[in-house]
Image (cartoon, helix red, strand yellow):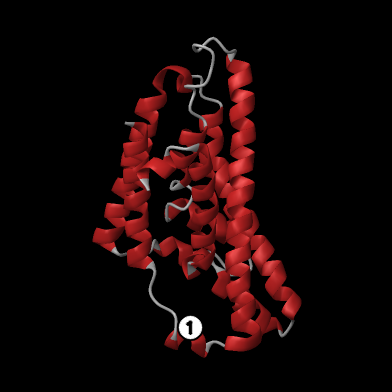
Amino acid sequence: MGDLMTTTAGLWLAVVFSGLYHGLNPGMGWPLAVSSALMQRNPRALYSALLALATGHFLAMLVILLPFSLMNALLAYERPLRIGAGIVVIALGLWLLITRRHPRFLARIPPSRLVLWSFVVAIVHGAALMLVPIYLGLCQVDDLEGGHQAASTLMGRNLMFTLGVAVLHTGAMLVAGGAVAIAVHRWLGLKFLTKSWFDLELLWALSLVLVGAIGVYAAW
């Protein structure tokens, strides 16, 4: 798997699969879309909520990734940055494994502000941070002509990568989360969540550690 993560195709697949994984995780908000549709007794409310959740998730991706696209330091410090990003992701995963606590301030965000809720959740739970090692792998500068390519050209290319990663990842998240939300709302019902679903918190923390470790390995 580590070798796959070092290839461009493998990295783009990681962007897609991480989006699908985030979408399936109820912690990223699809149960709120189901709840919105049930409370309003309007199926359209489900789609509006999903769009709001995706918008917040997309903005969180941009906030985390955009600074890296503007860093000239990528030219000289690409490997240390990739290793450092991987270590940070590992540390967050370990912290979540140890604490097992949800930030209390998330409960203070009203359900009506789904864009803000989704944005904050993607930041504090590390969903956006998980993409950093993958993104830096896509933006590696080994293929540049001896490092002589203009910084403006490099930043322009990286900006396109940022938008591409954020759009593709959020699209995959919307497809996966939306599919589950629609299935629960139309056919499975809320009892499905209590009888058939499983807790993804442990898996989420372990996945952060795994992605961070693969990022460090790929950079090294």
**Residue 115 visible, this orientation:** no
Q: Is residue 16 above or below residue 162?
A: below
Q: Is residue 65 left or right of residue 40?
A: left
Q: Is residue 214 above or below residue 72?
A: below
Q: Is residue 110 left or right of residue 217?
A: right
The residue depicted at 56 percent of the width and 59 percent of the height is 118
The residue depicted at 58 percent of the width and 66 percent of the height is 176
Residue 163 position, x and y percent, is 64, 40
**Residue 54 visible, this orientation:** yes
The image quarter containing residue 155 is top right
Residue 9 position, x and y percent, is 53, 42
Q: Is residue 40 left or right of residue 67?
A: right
Numbered disc 1: secondary structure:
helix
Q: Residues within 10 Å of mark 1 (few under 14, many from 20)?
A: few
> Foreground: 204 or 3?
3
Residue 215 position, x and y percent, is 37, 40
Q: Is residue 119 above or below residue 161?
A: below
The residue depicted at 59 percent of the width and 82 percent of the height is 184
According to the picture, the residue beneath numbered tag 1 turns out to be 193
Q: Is residue 182 left or right of residue 122?
A: right
Image quadrant for the C terminus? top left
> Foreground: 106 or 121?
121
The residue depicted at 54 percent of the width and 13 percent of the height is 145
> Foreground: 220 or 125?
220
Residue 66 position, x and y percent, is 56, 35
Q: Amino acid at mark 1?
A: Leu
